[in-house]
Image (cartoon, helix red, strand yellow):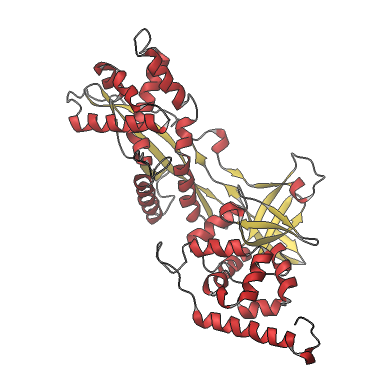
Amino acid sequence: MSGKNRKHHNSMPVKKNLSQAHQEHSYIIAKKMLRFFNLDPSLLDSFTKKQKQYLLRMIADIPSIKPEKENTIPRQYVKKIRSEMLEYMKTNYAGDSETENQLSYMDIATYGSGFYMLLTHGVITGYFTGTSQEKTAQQIYEAFGEHGAMNSCMGDVFWYLRFLTSSYSQVNFRIYGFHYHLDTGRPVAKGALSVQTKILLTVKDCESKIFTYNNIERKAFRLVFADAGDGSPLDKPRWAVVKRNLIFPKAKEDETFNIYIQSHVLHRFKERADTLKPSLRNFFIQYALSSGLIVASTEKHKFLTCTAKDDLPLGYFTFFIQDDDIVVNTFIPLASEITPEGKKLYEALQLGKEDIKYLGMDKLSFFTDIDFEQIPVLKQALIDSGIWPTKLLLDIMPYKDSEEDEPHIIDMQKTLFVKNFFDKLEEHRCDPLSGADDC
């Protein structure tokens, strides 16, 4: 894991030796690291006792997580992010968690990163040059990768941290981010040094602008990418944009629109994405309008898709354009007859806008509350329209009022209400007096 090495001020030399338990634990994690990078773990045993002491001499502290500047983030947010982050690192593994290796992200961030840094330092400075272990050290060094390998195996950790910081961010108020570095160099025992991943939580306040649309003035807030990385220029906060050629195909590749979002969008999203916890709503809005941005089209409309896992849509954001700005002004449900999926659903069922609202199909809870096996015609229409994969995804997402692992219960009363509606609709279509020829 790369980052900026920052040394503490020199302290008094420490004369105590490394404990046997520490050495044994470092040894185990180093072997797991070798196995993770598809190397024979017995390579570690080819080093001499002195070389192994050199490679395993880092004392690793658990990652530190705190605000970059004091009193800029509510304490309860910091405490929650810290506890959830550390628990994630302890209970999740790099690679296949089913294998006996089970290299946790906490192992990598502590003893694993220490082993990586010392081996890299030894190869670069020539510590192993001229010894019979030179080729072995070089082999491990190349497998770890001079750049990027450690970062890539920690990618899920920083993605999860991005999710956590986004969960507490609000696009019409304040965006939280983070950057990190490795703090090394403090002597903690005879011949040993410390290493600690330090994560600093950052804050970026939103900017607003007044737009006039349909003769009505409304405030909108500019969307920003928060910090998310090692503090390099590419990871600094920056304003979110949409490439113009996604909206207008003939536009130049380097031409962009700024993204603004009205508060009304948040109200509509809360109302219609009613199965989602506030943290997920915060995350999905930011993700959909930044790194997960997808433009969807019908014959008459263009939308910004609110995507979830595997780019499955939860609904769509509508927008208008003024000069160099795109202004997101509302959130519409999947079943709306103007969306790509909703248009197919309307053609299959011939339901109007008021029918959709009457049945509750304008809310995500409709797809988790109803037993569609009792309403075959509706289930088939959802499959044919492309909505069914989203319904299946919603089934495994945490419901807003339930615990993480608690299954959501079908609403039988609501199911009966919807079933009766479609039964009567079918009867009407089959009634000779109705003029319908569906039967």
- Seen as rendered, the residue at the extreme top is 130
Residue drawn at x 48%, y 59% as measured from the top left:
279
Q: Is residue 183 visible?
A: no
Q: State whether residue 43 appears in this view.
A: yes
Vertical comparison of 151 with 171: above or below: above
Q: In this rendering, would 111 be left or right of 358?
A: left
| Percent x, y of residue 247 | 76, 51
Place residue 265 in its image quadrant. bottom right
Q: Quadrant of the C terminus?
A: bottom right
Relative vertical location of residue 435 with respect to residue 188 in this rendering, above or below: below
Tell me the quarter of the image containing the N terminus.
top left
Q: State the residue in front, 292 or 12.
A: 292
Depth check: give the residue in front, 118 or 99: 99
Locate residue 405: give its quadrant: bottom left
Where residue 36 sits in the image (x, y, percent)?
A: 40, 33
Q: Left or right: 146 with respect to 289?
A: left
Q: Residue at x 54, y 61 (%)?
A: 393
Q: Residue 196: where, in percent of width, then height? A: 34, 34
Q: Is residue 342 above or below residue 196?
A: below
The x, y position of residue 429, in whole percent, is: 74, 85
Q: In the picture provided, is 128 more to the left or to the right than 438?
A: left
Q: Nearer the viewer, residue 139 or 362?
A: 139
In the image, residue 217 sits, relative to residue 204, either above or below, namely: below
| 247 horizontally vs 23: left or right | right
Q: Residue at x 20, y 33 (%)?
A: 21
Quadrant of residue 312 in the image? Answer: bottom right
